[in-house]
Image (spheres, grey):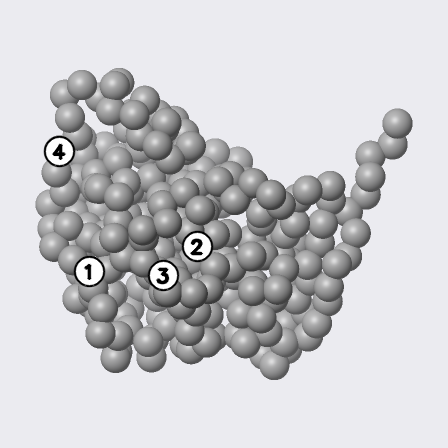
Amino acid sequence: MSQFPPHLVFEQQSVEGEVVQVWQQYDRRWLDFNDGLIQSEIILNNPEILPLPLNRAMLAGILFANIPKRVLLAGTGGGATARYFANCFPDVVGDAVEKSETVSDIARQYFELPTGNNWQIHTEDIVDYVQHCPHKYDLIIIDIAVNQKTPEWIIERNFLKQCRSLLTDKGHIALNLLVDDGNAFMHSLSAIRAVFDRHTACLSLPNYRNTVIFAFKNVPESLPAELREYLASLEASWGLEFGEFYQQMLKDNPHNSGVF
């Protein structure tokens, strides 16, 4: 029996000149900017599942925090993470910032981006948004890439300081870092650590170029002594592989580096 091939659901060129495509295979639907990378993916009828490892890894900072009350998504894509929160933690309030109106419309129409009282989408450049945002966030997720790399402006001091100022006392950011080599990685990590007083942790994704950087406004609470039970409880609540995240963090973060 042959596999049912992916089929193109929608295609449009954005104002910025990107070719934006929506693909589907069985109950999987994903967003593609025609650059070989899946930008966002959902499982239809299963909003509690985040199929992309990166989306799941971006939430691993919860190891050191509580369930966030307010979340900011910088770079919304299809909005899979917003959809996840809206269904698994409906009390969470969120703002999704996406500068492409084309992508925003696609997220609403094809990816079940939540709209209503708890989730708002803002069609705006995140650099401008953080300048006038009136809210404080427990979690800021920054997932923006240009030509399969993290743009330099994301690690600029002024932008990072503005993001830190929007965090609650126990808040943190999760930043998807895509760079070319080890030197570029250390340059980016050093810039982030300088703004966040070294309250950072790294999480690499095996078989992917991505490294997630978690940066905390203040020193996060220590992990509980009964770690195994704590990880099991988190995994049951979130449906995410927190045990695997923790083991990978132990490999990625030498002792006395950042929060470890």
The image shows residue 45, relative to residue 157, as above or below, that is above
* Residue drawn at (37%, 49%) of the image: 90
| Location of residue 19 by image quarter | bottom right
Circle 1 packing at 10 Å, graded few (<14), some (14-19), many (20+), is many
Per the image, the residue denoted by label 1 is 167
Secondary structure under badge 2?
helix
Count the marks.
Answer: 4
* Measured Cα–Cα span from mark 3 to mark 4: 30 Å
* Residue drawn at (51%, 39%) of the image: 49
The image shows residue 133, relative to residue 76, as above or below, that is below
| Location of residue 164 by image quarter | bottom left
**N-terminal of the two: label 4 or label 1?**
1
Q: Nearer the viewer, mark 3 or mark 4?
A: 3
Q: Nearer the viewer, mark 3 or mark 2?
A: 3
* Measured Cα–Cα span from mark 4 to mark 1: 19 Å
* Measured Cα–Cα span from mark 1 to mark 2: 18 Å
Q: Nearer the viewer, mark 1 or mark 3?
A: 3
Circle 3 packing at 10 Å, graded few (<14), some (14-19), many (20+), is some
Q: Nearer the viewer, mark 1 or mark 2?
A: 2
Secondary structure under badge 4?
loop
Whole-percent x, y for residue 230 in the image = 24, 24
Per the image, the residue denoted by label 2 is 82
**N-terminal of the two: label 3 or label 4?**
3
